[in-house]
Image (cartoon, rainbow, N blue to C red):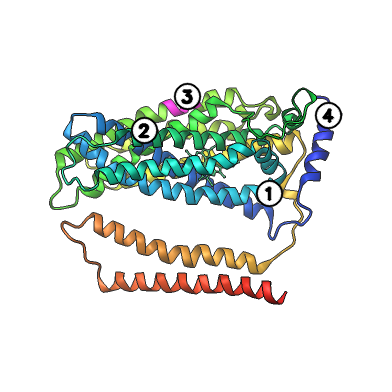
Amino acid sequence: MDASQVSNVTEMVNALQSPGGIPNHPLVFMVLAVLTFALHILFVQLLLGTSVITIWGSFSKNTHWRRLAAAMLKVAKVSTSVAIVFGVAPLLFVQVVYDPHWYASNVLSAMWVIAFIFILIFAYWGIYYYYFQNSKNKDKTVQPKSRWAMIFSLALMLVVGFIMHSLTSQMLHPELWKDWYTPNGVLDYSGSKLHAYNVWRFAFFISMAIPVAGAMLVSYRRFKSVRSDADHGYLNFAGELGKTWIKVGSVISAALYVSWMMTIPETAGDFATSFWGIIGGVLVLFYAVWAQVRLNGEAKFCSYMALPLALVIGLVVAISREMLRYEILDGFFGYDFMDYKIVFDWYSTIHFFATFLIVGGAVLTYFLTVAWQAGQTVGVYTPSPFVNRLGTIAIWIISIWTFMFLAVGFYVWAFR
Ligand code: HEM
């Protein structure tokens, strides 16, 4: 591309930016985008990895595998919900600072963006159908029914992920948007194509499901082993499998990371050999070494560290991924999200963080306490009065928040 073509693209992209500005410094949105993306992709990987274990175990004749499959199905279900919630968050932040790119990419593939919702609904339904078909069965070692639903769900989840991947890839090519919109000079309004993708990049993010699910297994063994009715033979089987998955999976993922870096767009210059280009892959490989060195014997503390460590590594990869986008969109095309016009709005900023910390914090504390204690209790779990009070407080906080939300909406609608 010559300089005048690049400047045409820069002008086009800047013209697409919202003139209304944003309510706080662009860096705030960017930090939140990276943070929530790291959480999103961790739970996506957890859901994919534990779904694979569920499917594999459902076809296995080994009773340990069958039990593990039933246990991991629960993780897959919860991870799907969390992945979706944490999927919406980066969506909100990316569309704020990269609105020209995000919306252009979405409009170019509008049919897929709409289909995304329906595909996701069917994928979610698949997991629950499988769950309800088998939940009444107390003996987790018999062959489960309707295994097709679980396979169907996993396949659709991958399609959903691929759509997101493609939208993200299309954002990186503003120089091609016009060609995609007018193939051979004829306008194409259909939005029926996904125009850009990078198999290595997609495979890298998906392959991280192996070490992340491995981390889940290692934590699962540790968590359940404190119960008086613990079956250590079964739990050690899960733990050993987890260690292998972390080690083998991290090596596979690191290789895919290198392939991704070798195939990034030319507009990224020498990003692949820069600090941020290298560090992501190095840390993924480090995960294998860590598992080899630290997950020996009981590994009481390190077993619990496996998942948080996966999150930290994912966070660094998320930063690398964001730096790549910045390198292309600012470095080559001259769109710097940091220059976004700011129109400070303290109410919405305070409202957002207060919701995040107070509402999210209170409800999560309650849920996590109940889940943790119930998981380690033999027989029926009865929450203590303190935990019950925590639940009541969480409900009050949500009710007050909902009331405030509606009241502000009504006030704006009626009086402004
Ligand atoms: C449950 C199945 C899902 C899977 C397997 C999945 C997978 C992925 C993957 C692989 C990426 C990284 C793409 C890349 O950088 O190449 C990604 C990014 C993303 N996903 Fe998901 N995702 C899922 C659901 C969702 C949902 C329900 C939402 C929100 C409605 C969502 C929103 C996002 C966003 C906003 C990004 C980042 C876009 C960007 O930074 O440009 N995802 N997802």
Q: Does the residue labelled 2 lie within 8 Å of ligand 1?
A: no
The residue lying toward the viewer, choosing from 359 and 148, is 148
Task: Give SS at disc 1.
Answer: helix
For the point 51% across and 28% down, which residue is it?
Answer: 257
Q: What residue type is labelled 4?
A: Gln
**Is residue 347 toward the left or the right of residue 354 in the image?**
right
**Furthest residue to the right?**
4
Q: What residue type is labelled 1?
A: Val
Q: Quadrant of the N terminus?
A: top right
**Is residue 262 toward the left or the right of residue 136 in the image?**
right
Which residue is label 3 attached to?
A: 255
Q: Residue 83 carries which label?
A: none
Q: Distance between the residues labelled 1 and 2?
A: 37 Å
| Mark 3–mark 4 CB contact (< 8 Å) | no
For the point 30% across and 30% down, which residue is it?
Answer: 244
Which residue is label 1 attached to?
A: 97
Which residue is label 4 attached to?
A: 5
The residue lying toward the viewer, choosing from 321 and 129, is 129
Percent x, y for residue 32?
57, 52
Is residue 175 placed above or below 361 in the rendered structure? above
For the point 35% across and 59% down, which residue is it?
Answer: 368
Question: For mark 3, does the 10 Å Cα neighbourhood hold few (<14), some (14 to 19), or many (20 or more) residues?
Answer: some
Q: What residue type is labelled 3?
A: Ala
Which residue is label 2 attached to?
A: 151
Q: What stretch is highlighted in magenta?
A: 252-256
Q: Earlier in the sequence, mark 4 or mark 2?
A: 4
Is residue 224 placed above or below 391 in the rendered structure? above
Q: Distance between the residues labelled 1 and 4?
A: 23 Å
Q: Which amino acid does label 2 sit on?
A: Ile
Please state which of the two labelled residues, at mark 4 or mark 2, is closer to the viewer: 2
